[in-house]
Image (tube, helix red, strand yellow):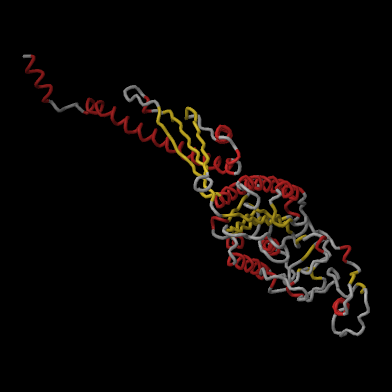
Amino acid sequence: MFVRYVRRLLDDRRGNIAPMFAMSLLPLLGMIGTAVDYSRASAVKSAIQSVLDSTALAMASKAATMTPSQLETDATNYFNALFNRPDTTGVTLHASYSNTNGPQLTLTAETNVKTTLMSLHGFGVESLAVSTSSTTSWGNTRLRVALALDNTGSMAQFSKMTALKNASKALIDQLSAAATVNGDVYISIVPFAKDVNVGTGNVAASWVGWTDAANNSSDHWNENQGSCSKSYSNNPASNSKKKRCQNAGGVWTSSNHANWTGCVMDRNQPNDTTNTPPVAGNVATLFPAEAYANCGTELMPLSYNWTALKARIDTMQPNGNTNTTIGLEWGWHSLTQNSPLNAPPEPSPYVYNKVIIFLTDGDNTQNRFTSNQAQIDARMSLACTNAKAAGIQIYTILVMQGSEPLLKACATDPSYYFKITQANQILTVFNQIGTKLAKLHVAK
């Protein structure tokens, strides 16, 4: 009787969904738990990799001078200051430096990620092991970076100038950390408004023009004003007094150059959008001096004096109107091994990455040649095209307002263009660019 009852129960297929579901629930939960926990572990690994790369770059400049213990301690402290994932049980970091086949720094990190569903009763997996590494090797690449920074009056609004100063100094610190020896990284500072201040110390430079053939208004110097140390009456009267004086072997002393504040405006066209070296005596190729009240902060040519570079940043003050073309042009000039700024030599066998980081917060309105906005922007666009054709990498940053199409087209590619809506975002953008540039110098 009992046997017959059991047989009927086993043969009956009605109402067996619940028992079957209960029997399949456990492996189903196991698969879901595995997917969730492995996804979390993958996210942790990505986070560790990002911080590990930053740590390797930060340690690169000093690894060769540290003991293995010091290197590991400093790297661990730097890593822990950036990494915060409470779902891990702590990260163990190891660091090693070698110079067998060229300098190389290797960091490895290991941790355990606490599981959620996989740790439930019946599975018994309490954590998943995660490990990753970052290797930084020094190649033959060197960096030369020009910071072309808008110093116009609008930069006083919304704390933009304060944010720009802080971000620029942080970028200098970031790039200097990637340098292992002097000369690995050079940086120039080019503040701009309508004009650029090249410094009164260049008053006698052969590339400064004191007569502007295109616009000899009262704001510009006339080289007929002054005196000569020698008679020049027998020289051709068609020449300027300065030229006649020099032809006679005299020394020309200008009467009003002492009041010059260091400002120069755009060169005559077409040299205003090129990097053609100036030629003494050829007015069109020179950089016309201008009596401009809002001359701004003096530029600083390429240097690895990090303290002096940051000090120059601190002196920047917002004033004047916007001429983006002259800012980009002088950034380009600072990267070039000829007059006016004579960038340092580029000894072999190194490869030199030349970069302009260009930031502005306003429309490009100033132009000595025209008031037509389309023509003003076309001049800037041509300068960008010429610089990129010469191998210059250009990052452009638009702060709050300005011509987005112009700056986006000026950038080397779309990923080199940034548009930000708040001043405090300048720091974030400069950090992103700095990380990318540092990796150009120390190759992973």
Query: On the picture, is 259 further left or further right than 301?
Result: right
- On the image, the x and y values in percent for residue 168 come to 68, 48
At 19% from the left and 27% from the top, the residue drawn is: 16
- On the image, the x and y values in percent for residue 56 come to 54, 41
| Residue nearest the observer in this picture, 292 or 330 | 330
At 66% from the left and 60% from the top, the residue drawn is: 345
- On the image, the x and y values in percent for residue 181 come to 63, 48
Query: On the picture, is 402 further left or further right than 238?
Result: left
Residue 279 seen in this snapshot? yes
| Residue nearest the observer in this picture, 25 or 75 | 75
| Residue nearest the observer in this picture, 103 or 165 | 103
The image quadrant that residue 214 belongs to is bottom right
Number of numbered discs overlaid on the protein picture:
0
Please state, as top left, top right, bottom left or bottom right, where the N terminus lies in the image. Answer: top left
Query: On the picture, is 90 further left or further right than 223?
Result: left
At 39% from the left and 35% from the top, the residue drawn is: 38
Query: On the picture, is 224 further left or further right than 281?
Result: right
Against 30, residue 330 (above or below) is below
Which residue is the extreme one toward the top? Answer: 1
Against 218, residue 405 (above or below) is above
- On the image, the x and y values in percent for residue 194 come to 75, 62
Against 340, residue 97 (above or below) is above
Residue 241 seen in this snapshot? no
The image quadrant that residue 259 belongs to is bottom right
